[in-house]
Amino acid sequence: MTKVLIVEDEPINMKLVVEILNSLDFRIHTAKNGIEAQAMADKDIYDLILMDIELPGIDGVETARRIKDKPRHNKTPIIALTAFAMEGDREKFLDVGFDNYISKPIHITDFIDLMKDFLRGNNEPE
């Protein structure tokens, strides 16, 4: 079973992502901020991390960098989950080390397709 860490501080967004991933049989762990996410990544190995960018305290970009700096997670795919959806934002997040990008509000069908691609081993950004 695929183990995923969702890092999201907005309860409504967290609930939606959890419900979608539950329907796909992912094993889900959640964190509400970057500090929590780092602590969880220090204790466990994840197959995938979905990371909000606008987090309280340490933002998602810095949190992702810190997690990827750990040898146990340097190959763990981390997907930016963000409301930043302007032209060039996707490329910006890929350039700073995210493995893919999902804009909010989440388009459920596209999100499910991306997660199914991930399960099939295709986690390359389009």
Image: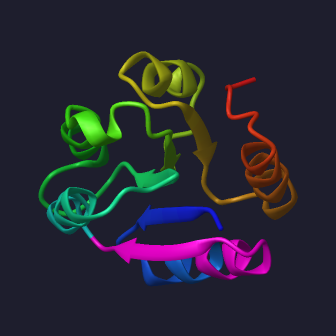
Residue 125, image quadrant? top right
Residue 26, image quadrant? bottom right
Q: Which residues are magenta?
A: 18-32
Q: Nearer the viewer, residue 82 or 49?
A: 49
Q: Is residue 60 magenta?
A: no
Residue 62 lies left or right of residue 102; in this view the side is left
On screen, residue 33 above or below 123? below
Q: Residue 11: percent from the left, percent from the top?
A: 45, 83
State the colouring used for the structure image.
Answer: rainbow
Q: Residue 47: percent from the left, percent from the top?
A: 52, 52
| Residue at the image point whose x is 42% and y is 52% from the top | 51
| Residue at the image point whose x is 60% and y is 23% from the top | 87
| Residue at the image point whose x is 77% and y is 47% from the top | 114
Q: Is residue 26 magenta?
A: yes
Instruction: Judge whether residue 65 can be spotted in this image.
Output: no
Check the picture and name the quadrant holding the N terminus.
bottom right
On screen, residue 18 above or below 99? below
Instruction: Judge whether residue 71 can be spotted in this image.
Output: yes
Q: Residue 57: percent from the left, percent from the top?
A: 12, 59
| Residue at the image point whose x is 73% and y is 75% from the top | 25
Check the picture and name the quadrant holding the C terminus.
top right
* Total numbered labels placed on residues in the image: 0
Q: Residue 115: percent from the left, percent from the top?
A: 74, 53
